[in-house]
Amino acid sequence: MENEYKQRNDVHSVTLRAGKKRTYFFDVRTTKNNDYFLTITESKRVADDEGYERHKIFLYKEDFVKFVEALQETVDYVKTELLPDYDFDNPKYRDDEDTDYNNRDGE
């Protein structure tokens, strides 16, 4: 029964590799009541072969819109007020060979 729940629990996953030591995981999961929530995990490699440090955020559907709005407002502030001369759209910064974005569901 627990294994069946674990299989249902993972609905959709996306991985974002950001540099050589950092990976972000975006996972949609279900609760036992068939509701959905999002986990955002930052996984960072610690020193040579000493494992990983992980940090998670659990985001529930009722907070999706507020979370995205706050994140966008914060990113916009950094772009316009703190780093107005930084070219965020330059492929040099976006398509680093160590950066990889993929959907773990194969979609």
Image: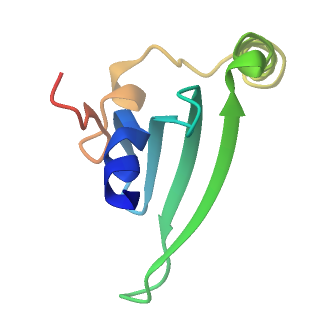
As drawn, which residue projects farthest toward the front? 1
* Residue 1 visible, this orientation: yes
Q: What percent of the width, then of the height, locates residue 61?
A: 68, 20
Determine which quarter of the picture holds residue 27.
Answer: top left
* Residue 84 visible, this orientation: no
Picture residue at 41% right of the left edge, 18% below the top: 90
Choose between 96 and 57: the one closer to the eye.
57
Q: What percent of the width, then of the height, locates residue 16?
A: 38, 39
As drawn, which residue projects farthest toward the left? 106
Colouring style: rainbow
Picture residue at 36% right of the left edge, 39% below the top: 8
Left/right placement of residue 95 relative to residue 87 reads left
Determine which quarter of the picture holds residue 36.
Answer: top right
Quadrant including the N terminus: bottom left
Q: What percent of the width, then of the height, locates residue 64?
A: 70, 17
Left/right placement of residue 11 relative to residue 47 reads left
Picture residue at 55% right of the left edge, 53% below the top: 42
Left/right placement of residue 107 relative to residue 34 reads left
Q: In the image, is residue 65 above or below residue 63?
A: above
Picture residue at 50% right of the left edge, 79% below the top: 46
